[in-house]
Image (spheres, rainbow, N blue to C red):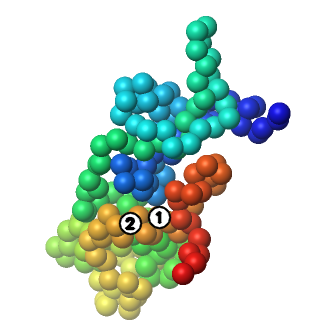
Amino acid sequence: MYHPDLIRHPDSCPALVLNADYTPLSYYPLSVWPWQTAVKALFLERVDVVSYYEREVRSPSARLKLPSVIALKQYVKPSQFPAFTRFNLFLRDKFSCQYCGTQRDLTFDHVIPRAQGGRTTWENVATACAPCNLKKGGRTPQQAAMPLHIQPIRPTSWQLQEHGRRFPPNYLHETWRDWLYWDVELLA
């Protein structure tokens, strides 16, 4: 019987990682492990396999179907507040310039410029496209007559996960779809 998974190279068979409560560890970036890490965790009894690929790996004495979805046996409590990184900043601002709304040529801007005492914090940095950042220069949004679409805040990890759901990856294996909720309308 032919199945598309059978011709896949093992390196293209990552395992979706779920927490012990069967929710994804992360949506964006999607929490996946290479097949080798998933198999090692399985043998160390740190995960339960929820679903398998049809693809197998073999040794001289054994055959093993590759796990496609795994769940940790011990719950990992997510951090309440995410790290302040460029990626997380862009995710908070939904990969859009907070001045004009474009999604191209993104950088970040200090709302109160550092030259005026502004600090590099969640509450003082916003995503901006390079043209808007250059136009604003070393002025505040009020001085430059460039209002922000949304005032910058320190997001929670939950807020970033919610924003991450709006950006599904290019590839989702069919066994992952029951555990991920992108553009799914739930029936009441």
Question: Badge 2: few (under 14), some or many (20 or more) residues near its Cα, within 10 Å?
Answer: many
Rendered residue at 48%/52% (across/down): 30
Q: Where residue 29 appears, x then y in whole percent?
A: 46, 53
In the depicted view, which residue is nearer to us: 76 or 186?
186
In the depicted view, which residue is nearer to us: 75 or 35?
75
The residue under label 1 is which amino acid type? Gly
Q: Quadrant of residue 23?
A: bottom left
Seen in the image, is 40 located left or right of residue 152?
right
The residue under label 2 is which amino acid type? Leu
Q: Is residue 160 visible?
A: yes
Q: Which mark is residue 164?
A: 1
Seen in the image, is 62 located left or right of residue 80?
right
Rendered residue at 54%/81% (across/down): 188
Residue sitting at the far right: 1
Question: Badge 1: few (under 14), some or many (20 or more) residues near its Cα, within 10 Å?
Answer: many
In the depicted view, which residue is nearer to us: 96 or 175?
175
As measured in the structure, the alpha-carbon distance from the residue carrying label 1 to the one carrying label 2 is 6 Å
Rendered residue at 50%/66% (across/down): 165
Residue sitting at the far left: 117
Q: Which mark is residue 160?
A: 2
